[in-house]
Image (cartoon, rainbow, N blue to C red):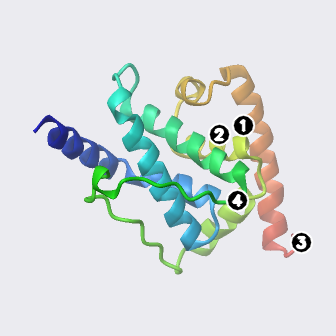
Amino acid sequence: MQAKLNQDEFVALVHQHRAMLYKVCNLYCTSDYDKQDLFQEIVIQLWGAYPRFRGDSKFSTWLYRIALNTAISDLRKQKKIIKSVEPELLPTEIQDIQYSNEKEERLQQLYKAINHLTEIERAITMLYLEDKSYEEMEDILGINQNNLRVKMNRIKEKLRKLTKSVEHGVR
């Protein structure tokens, strides 16, 4: 009974924070298939780590840390390794994300520009767009606040240049 309660609690929390997961998938993947694959991988990692979540930090901070680490690790691997997971051990109530091909043009331009950033720059950008404080970013990424501020200023300038070049067809 306790396992079912934990599973229901987990499903509710992931459902509540699914927009965060979608953003991570959008930032680190370009194809719909890869986005769905990354989403599933993040949920698997979250589920595996959930019993160790002690509540020392906010759930969203913990979720971000695992989602970003999973996305960055997956990106670095460059080749997909099929992992065997017992399907009956995974919660089935979490649906795969469905992406629409009809997104706003400006959002697509921003994502294209963000794709030219490094892995860490992408993570900082996403957290910034989520209105995370520099203190929360430090907790999630392990980068001190002064360095984050400097990096954020450089990222903003880089994105300005990249979005102008995308608009004018330079890239």
Q: Earlier in the sequence, mark 2 or mark 3?
A: 2
Q: Is the C terminus in the top left, top right, bottom left or bottom right quadrant?
A: bottom right
Q: Is the N terminus in the top left, top right, bottom left or bottom right quadrant?
A: top left
Q: Residue at x 78, y 57 (%)?
A: 116
Q: Find the distance from the CA under tag 4 to the CA under tag 1.
A: 30 Å
- Look at the numbered disc 1 and give the secondary structure of its residue: helix
Most distant residue in the left direction? 1
Question: Dot 2 corresponds to which residue?
Answer: 124
Residue 22 seen in render: no
| Label 3 crowd bin: few (<14), some (14–19), many (20+), radius 10 Å | few
Q: Are marks 2 and 1 in contact (CB under 8 Å)?
A: yes
Question: Dot 3 corresponds to which residue?
Answer: 170
Q: Find the distance from the CA under tag 2 to the CA under tag 3.
A: 25 Å
Q: Residue at x 39, y 65 (%)?
A: 96
- Look at the numbered disc 3 and give the secondary structure of its residue: loop
Residue 114 seen in render: yes
Task: Decide if residue 89 is on the left or right side of residue 171.
Answer: left
Q: Which mark is residue 70?
A: none
Mark toward the viewer: 4 or 1 = 4
Q: Which mark is residue 152?
A: 1
Q: Mark 3 belongs to which amino acid?
A: Val
**Quadrant in the rendering for residue 107:** bottom right
Q: Position of residue 159 (x, y in %)?
A: 76, 53
Q: Residue at x 34, y 23 (%)?
A: 55
Q: Earlier in the sequence, mark 2 or mark 1?
A: 2
Task: Decide if residue 144 is on the left or right side of residue 67.
Answer: right
Mark toward the viewer: 2 or 4 = 4
Q: Mark 1 belongs to which amino acid?
A: Met
Q: Earlier in the sequence, mark 4 or mark 1?
A: 4
How many discs appear? 4
| Label 4 crowd bin: few (<14), some (14–19), many (20+), radius 10 Å | few
Most distant residue in the bottom direction? 102
